[in-house]
Image: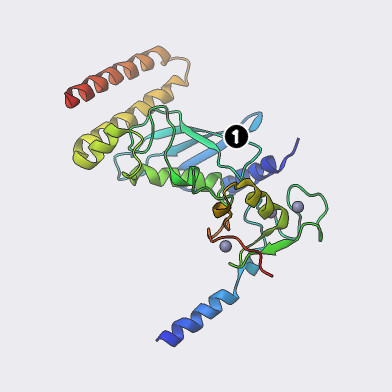
Amino acid sequence: MSTAARRRLMRDLKRLQSDPPQGVQGAPLDNNIMTWQAVIFGPDDTPWEGGTFKLLLEFTEDYPNKAPAVRFVTKMFHPNIYNDGQICLDILQNQWSPIYDVSAILTSIQSLLCDPNPASPANSEASRLYQDNRREYNRRVKEVVEQSWIADDDDDEDGDEEGEEEAGAEKEKGGAAGGGGQA
Amino acid sequence: MKVKIKRWHAVATWQWDVNDERCGICYTAFEACCPDCHIPGDDCPPVWGRCNHAFHMHCIMKWLNSQQNANKQTCPACRQKWEFRA
Ligand SMILES: [Zn+2]
Ligand SMILES: [Zn+2]
Ligand SMILES: [Zn+2]
């Protein structure tokens, strides 16, 4: 059935295709316009450069009067992104307005990557490093950039297991380093 | 100098969103009706706020009704408190 939310999402899709913003892509799943997959490419000349970060956007029939639920599927390391991929961004919460569309949402998230808001930390370690140790912060960001390629390989049936093992090893290493820092 | 700025401001105010023929909420044209209606016409007119932003009547009502907190009943475009222009 064609509801107001679905028609609006069709317009969002047309706009995203006819006037694509730089560095982001998005499209609804094949048989469900209420769920979108999106990719944000890490902006050039930043530690995020080269990364391909996947997101999932889930809309309700209240769209555009309510913001969609947006989360990163790719593992991130960012002051305003929780470990489960949820994003702490004002326009997705209390500053939402029904004039936003998918294009606006994705470009806002893209600019959040390089311009974190330390006032609302969602990842305390990333937040601390961003403020106190930018070198280490950048190194950790580059790590997730590299992991985003490994995650991409997972899509191909072949390199599946190898990729997962590598990602797991990285994670353990990161955890140990974090624990050492805190002690 | 101050006089010039005032005059410029007056011009800017005069040009309210008449150029924008689309409703900023549903993205359809004002001459068409909102997605909840089927027949364009007087049942679904564009309405203006005191801030001079315009939306389909049904679209702005749906937005305002979705905001439980009266302080949040703002214009979607400029976030000023929404009041219908007489
Ligand atoms: Zn409308
Ligand atoms: Zn209507
Ligand atoms: Zn306004």
Which residue position is annotated with label 1? A28
Residue situated in front as seen by the camera: A96 or B38: A96
As drawn, is A143 to the left or to the right of B65? left
Establish if B1 lies above or below A149. below
Quadrant into which the C terminus of chain A falls = top left
Residue A108, how many percent across, how many down? 45, 47
Residue B64, how many percent across, how many down? 63, 52
As drawn, is A72 to the left or to the right of A1? left
Establish if B24 lies above or below A173. below
Residue situated in front as seen by the camera: B40 or A47: B40
Residue B44 found in image quarter: bottom right
Q: Residue at x 29, y 20 (%)?
A: A170
Residue situated in front as seen by the camera: B78 or A53: B78
Residue A133 found in image quarter: top left
Q: Is residue A113 at all visible to an observer of this figure?
A: yes
Residue A101, how many percent across, how many down? 56, 47
The quadrant of the picture showing ligand 1 is bottom right
